Amino acid sequence: MDIDHDIEEDLDILPSGADLAYLDEDDAEWIAAELAEVEDQQLEARRPFIGRVAVIGYPNVGKSTLVNRLSGTRIAITHETAGVTRDRKEIECEWNGHQFILVDTGGVDHGDRSSMSKEIRSQVKSAISECDLVLLVVDGQMGVSAADHELTDLLRSTRARVRLVANKVDNPNNENEAAEFFELGLGMPIPVSAHHGNNTGDLLDIVVEELEEVGTPFNRDDDKAIRIAIVGRPNVGKSTLANAILGHGRHIVADMPGTTRDSVDTRFDFEDREIILVDTAGLRRRRSGQDPLDYYSEVRALQAADRADVAILLVDASMGVRENDLAVADAMRERDCCVIVGLSKWDINEVDLFDVTETIAQKLRQRPEVVTTSSTENRNVQKLLRKAIELHDKAAKKVSTGEFNRLLRELKERNPGPLDKRSRRRLNILYGTQVQTGPPKFRVYVNAKELMTRPYGFFLENQIRAKFGFEGCPLIIEYRSRA
């Protein structure tokens, strides 16, 4: 496959000589050089992952801390309370020029017979089957436990490729003590300290070496599933909506706000489209003395938006649109996530739909569509999901460079750029192209970007949104001028 050709064909960003012929020679030269850099960045983004690695273990052995250390992120929730991680999460990791996925899983406790524990075990088994390599994390301070033997038996039954990692070996002088885990029959354990970082580089070397041998390479865009996050203030019915969409009680629902602590990803098919639904913890204004787990739930909800294509912003119709709802929508926009508004509990509403729609249209730059819904009565649930898919497809739309520049010329003729009264210089739009989809991102080249004003920027954004049907999508416009 000719990657260079595919990128040029997909993005349509590299102009021919004729495209820039109307520009000053110096302007044409620096714009062409900038666009060549964009192509290089797109080539880098197409670099494949070499495989997937599942991280499993008993609760509170430091799996999430290890995932954060290996990935150089703080994505996985870590807390001294056991069982904070309840579902598997995929996190990108890079080491020595190689990219792979780390899958953080919930702690497996065979002695816990609760429904939550059963769900965690199911998720862990799925992660093992989907990954090329498994890191079994044990507590190097506590020594070999019956739970470690139970997990070892589970792994033997799956014929998974396994590496044993003894965590919490914080003192390098005690590394030899990790050898007692050799009795598990999974080879010599690798002693590490996720907290201090001891030997984690050696562990990454081993992971890359294993994946180069047995890994299944894949690209970012191999997964065609549409990622939809359900977001909103606490207790607006997010889990109830998720249950209605999925058709069963997959998520815990209670009248008490804050039942959902973490983001739970569920993959399913809907009308020949593959969907990944993310039900998130509620977002609320931060308070002093806030429960640390509430804080991490907020972080997880925002991170869910980071990896989602579309956010269904659920608003309690019985209470109307509040400032917090608008703040959540704005947070989604800042994270480049498309937004559709679902008015929940419509069966008991006491507000006027027109008033709600007008408020949203005035307050939110994305101009999102509003859909009324009642999860308990299954009203408009499928319509809401269908609209979210349509919004995803809008955001994935590619505008040709020729069509985009024709619009820019029309707008410039209709409403010339602002004039700086002091310097007597006027903003001049030279050239533009779309450099990204999902969400749509445009790069517009101008004579001097400091001449751009907020009103004129909003004018261009609104015209581009209306012309190409990007309502509900975050529209990113990057203005560039010659240094």
Image (cartoon, rainbow, N blue to C red):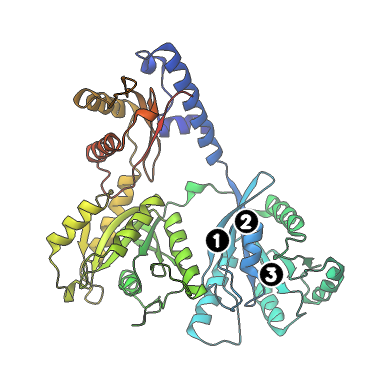
Percent position of residue 330, x then y: 34, 55
Marking on residue 75: 1
Q: Is residue 30 above or below residue 160?
A: above
The type of residue carrying mark 1 is: Ile
Confirm or deny contact between disc 2 and disc 1 (CB under 8 A). Answer: yes
Q: Residue at x 21, y 27 (%)?
A: 415
Q: Which residue is mark 2?
A: 71
Q: Looking at the picture, does residue 428 appear above or below residue 381?
A: above
Q: Is residue 2 visible?
A: no
Residue 481 spot, x, y in % from top left? 43, 26
> SS for tag 2?
helix
Q: Secondary structure at mark 1?
A: loop
Which residue occupies the foreground of this view, 235 or 322? 322
Q: Which residue is located at x 44 percent, y 60 percent?
A: 302
Task: Name the secondary structure under disc 3.
Answer: strand
Mark 2 vs 3, N-terminal side: 2
Q: Which mark is residue 136?
A: 3
Residue 313 placement: quadrant: bottom left
Q: Amino acid at mark 3?
A: Leu
Residue 419 pos. (x, y %): 28, 24
Q: Mark 1 packing: few (<14 Cα in 10 Å), some, or many (20+)? A: some
In this view, 279 is above or below 252: above
The reply, left or right, for residue 289 in relation to residue 479 is right
Q: Is residue 337 left or right of residue 74?
A: left
Q: Residues within 10 Å of mark 3 (few under 14, many from 20)?
A: many
Whichever of labels 3 and 1 marks the residue nearer the N terminus, that label is 1
